[in-house]
Amino acid sequence: MIPIKNPEAIRRMREACAIAATILARLKAQVRPGITTYDLDQIGRDLISSFGARSAPYGYKHGSGRPYPAYTCLSVNEEVVHGIGSLKRILRDGDIISVDVTIEYNGYIGDNAVTVPVGAIAPRVAELLQVTEAALHLGIKQAAVGNRIGDISHAVQTYVEAHGFGIVREMVGHGVGRQMHEEPQIPNFGRKNSGEKIKPGMTLAIEPMVNLGGPAVRTLGDGWTIVTTDGQPSAHFEHTVLTTDSGPEILTIPRAT
Ligand code: MF3
Ligand code: CO
Ligand code: CO
């Protein structure tokens, strides 16, 4: 069963998501050639604390592995998601970096990500970014009351594959609320009219992860960083969305400053 949020939970989700989006906007503005991903993560840490929020990934455990050691997820080029900021990873002209900010504020979680170019990037890589972001928005459109979760998945898959890119299957979108990962799972591939029915009051993180080359990925020895097996670049865009009777509403929109 997919949790339905009551009005108070929705109020808090709005707050948390607005903060997550404002932090993401400010952090992505710091991306430039020469900066290390460690420095970006430290900036992320400071931004999160300046809002009185908490990093949801920091200290997060899955399975028996070591807790996630960074405040944000910073994934460069062939890194798909869950990259850990490092002094050794210096951004260079022509790179891309996926910035994923997940925060908890007042008991609720906002989750959002973008992939941004570092300087000038190759045309096919620019297309990868455009297609992944457009796929996210096509998926969001399907998060309509009366549709099913599979309609989101199908819309993303169809569009991405039509452009010849590879869809990552090992990681999926998800419900989000008091917990970072709630029901349902939202794969970026699937069949129309499959899965649970969408009702008002669901908060869903929709997040296509798309590879320039093949869909295969593996985990690095740090236990977290997911990379493409073929070493080609990967993009990731994510929003937290509220389902309503008047259509899907993106909650991860920055506050006017
Ligand atoms: N932000 C990620 C997501 O979109 C979750 C972070 S996983 C962590 O689901 F392990 F880094 F916390
Ligand atoms: Co995320
Ligand atoms: Co997510």
Image: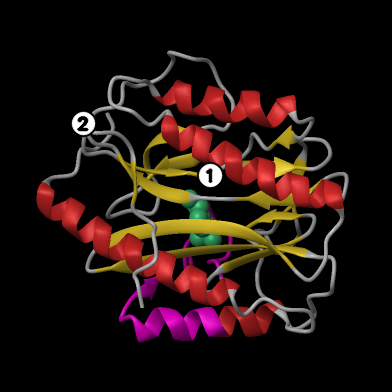
Percent x, y of residue 232: 85, 49
At 51% across and 40% down in the image, what residue appears? 137
Percent x, y of residue 76: 74, 63
Q: Please say if 217 is above or below 106.
A: above
The answer to whether 204 appears left or right of 91 in the picture is: left
Reply yes or no: does residue 65 show up in magenta. Answer: yes
Near-viewer residue (43 or 114): 114
Reply yes or no: does residue 53 show up in magenta. Answer: yes
Report helix, strand or loop for mark 1: loop
Ligand 3 neighbours mark 1 (CB distance < 8 Å) = yes
Magenta stretch: give its range: 43-68
Q: Please say if 131 is above or below 37.
A: above
Tell me the tag on residue 155. Answer: none
Q: In which quadrant of the rendered image does the N terminus lie?
A: top left
Q: Tell me the residue that label 1 is attached to.
A: 207
Alpha carbon separation for disc pair 2 and 1: 22 Å
Identify which amino acid the numbered label 1 is placed on.
Answer: Glu
Badge nearest the viewer, 2 or 1: 2
Percent x, y of residue 10: 19, 51
Tell me the tag on residue 245. Answer: 2
Identify which amino acid the numbered label 2 is placed on.
Answer: Asp
At 79% across and 30% down in the image, what residue appears? 164
The answer to whether 173 appears left or right of 16 in the picture is: right
Q: In which quadrant of the rendered image does the C terminus lie?
A: bottom left
At 24% across and 28% down in the image, what residue appears? 199
Q: Which quadrant of the figure has residue 220? A: bottom right
Near-viewer residue (195 or 246): 246
Residue neighbourhood size for the residue with mark 1, other residues' Cα within 10 Å, grouped as few (<14), some (14–19), many (≥20): many
Q: Quick one: which residue is furthest to the front in this view?
A: 256
The answer to whether 91 appears left or right of 252 in the picture is: right
> Total number of numbered labels?
2
Give the overall secondary structure of the magenta segment: loop
